Amino acid sequence: MDKEVDPAVIAVINEKRLTGEKRTPVDIISRMGVFDAREKASDQAWLASGDNVIITIWAEFVSVGAGGRWFYLESLDTHHRLGGGGERTALQSQRAKDRLQLLKRSLDLGLSVRAVLQTNRVAIAGLETDKAAKVSVRVQDEQEWHVAAWDADEKVAVLVRGPRGWLPNEDEVKAARARGSVPPVAVQAVPSGDITPESVHAAAIEYLTKHFAGYGYKPENVTSQKLGYDIEVTDKKGKTLLKLAVKGTAPGVKTFKLTDEERTCAKKGDPWRMVVVTDAIGPAAQHKIYKPEEVDKAPGLEL
């Protein structure tokens, strides 16, 4: 809600809202290059025309640091809601994963992101719990944002508005965490002594199976057949889209190897891919897919 927003931030939003052309939340992202904007209006991030990444920034969670610099703490935990911190639904979790993938992509490529500033109709704690929690105001931010820091251990990234080269200090980050955009780091559910390469691999396969099934594809675990890949992903007509050699990392399991069968299959090319799931047993699992010619450069691969 507006009263939860820092005065400096709400002033910018109000000026933009009152002086600009009146547009609906859908119109705004549509004019920024988002295809099928109406169907994707509830998403948290979009890959728009021109290969631009556009993200939502909930103004209630924006903090103002030294020199008036704006920053936003981005949770890397895709399983727990913002504000309240309870469990997300499958749809909410998938939207969070899609958003993080786009943000990580922009970080890896050194690209800025465009933002729409939003306020919520109800208290921000109800952002993902109240069915009435919809956009109150959405305006396009004229300044670009960028991912200034990414801490997988603390499950948080720092997004900064404006030029690069600035980061909030420790006290500013601590105060920002109190605003509730980043749930507390969950205690590791699996004792470190029980984390083995086998358990991490199994968790990575489970994660990817749910991921691709969530998009309507059929992922089949074929690990036991030793074909040179672990999951075969097919479409509704049975066409094979991907043959995935699955690797995972977690605390205590930082590296992985390719088997002889996997390297042989990789030489055949499409549709073989290696996919690495980081934090496979934790609440912020993420994955990255590598083409055959890219695998030897993957972090964690033992050659």
Image (cartoon, grey):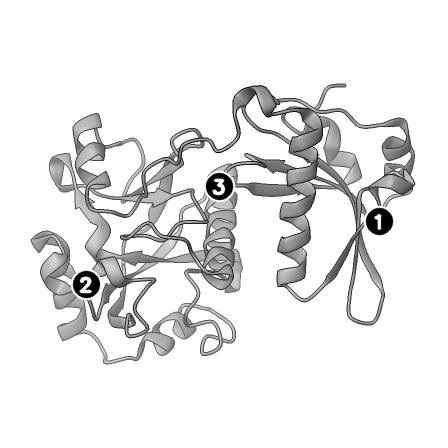
Q: In which quarter of the image is the C terminus?
A: top right
- Disc 1, disc 2: CB below 8 Å? no
**Which callout, 2 or 3, points at the residue further toward the start of the chain?**
2
Please give the residue where the numbered disc 1 appears in the rendered image: 270
On-image quarter of the N terminus: bottom left
Q: Residue 167: where, in percent of width, then height?
A: 26, 31
Which residue carries the number 2 mark? Answer: 123
Name the N-terminal-most of marks 1 and 2.
2
Q: According to the image, label 3 marks what residue?
A: 284
Q: Check contact, mark 2 vs mark 3: CB within 8 A.
A: no
> In the drawing, does residue 285 fall left or right of residue 215?
left
Amino acid at circle 3? Ala
- Local secondary structure at mark 3: loop
Residue 46 in picture, x, y percent from top left: 47, 61
Residue 105: image x %, image y %? 52, 44
State the separation of the CA atoms marked 2 and 3. 25 Å
